């Protein structure tokens, strides 16, 4: 029954991009994203997500760094790639009452 579940997104959008690092020779894009997830985003997500879980919601997507919406931009003359955090999305569902 396709009408059995209701869906919503837990997350946020940033009005402006927040630069979280520059990938290049010293550090990879993946390292920047993983570090930002572990040290900054994950603790906030888990704290706020608990309310959704208490209300009967369950995640459909994994709760990890892949939930982060990131954009990249060429760093120009100095090389590398700037990495920006644009937001976060976790698809949630719960059974209709």
Image (spheres, rainbow, N blue to C red):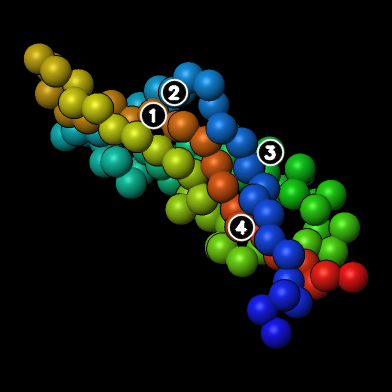
Q: Quadrant of the C terminus?
A: bottom right
> Which residue has dot 3 on it?
44
Residue located 66% across and 79% down the image: 2
Mark 3 falls on what kind of element? helix
> Which residue has dot 1 on it?
84
Percent x, y for residue 29?
Answer: 29, 41
Q: Quadrant of the N terminus?
A: bottom right
Percent x, y for residue 21?
Answer: 35, 27
* Tag 1 near tag 2, CB within 8 Å: yes
Which one is in front, 88 or 25?
88
Indicate which disc, 4 or 1, sits on the residue closer to the N terminus: 1
Q: CA distance from mark 4 to mark 1?
A: 21 Å
Which one is in front, 48 or 57?
57
Mark 4 vs mark 3, foreground winner is: 4
Mark 3 vs mark 2, foreground winner is: 2
Residue located 56% across and 47% down the image: 89
Q: Is residue 39 visible?
A: no
* Tag 3 near tag 1, CB within 8 Å: no
Indicate which disc, 2 or 4, sits on the residue closer to the N terminus: 2
> Which residue has dot 4 on it?
91
Q: Is residue 51 above or below residue 84?
A: below
> Which residue has dot 2 on it?
17
Percent x, y for residue 75?
Answer: 20, 21
């Amino acid at each position: 029954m396709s009408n059995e579940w209701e869906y919503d997104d837990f997350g946020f959008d940033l009005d402006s991009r927040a630069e979280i690092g520059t990938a290049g020779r010293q550090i990879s894009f993946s390292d920047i994203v993983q570090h930002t997830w572990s040290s900054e985003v994950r603790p906030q997500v888990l704290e706020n997500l608990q309310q959704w879980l208490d209300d009967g919601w369950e995640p459909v997507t994994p709760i990890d760094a892949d939930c982060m919406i990131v954009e990249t931009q060429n760093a120009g003359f100095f090389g590398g790639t700037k990495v920006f955090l644009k937001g976060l999305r976790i698809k949630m569902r719960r059974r209709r009452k």
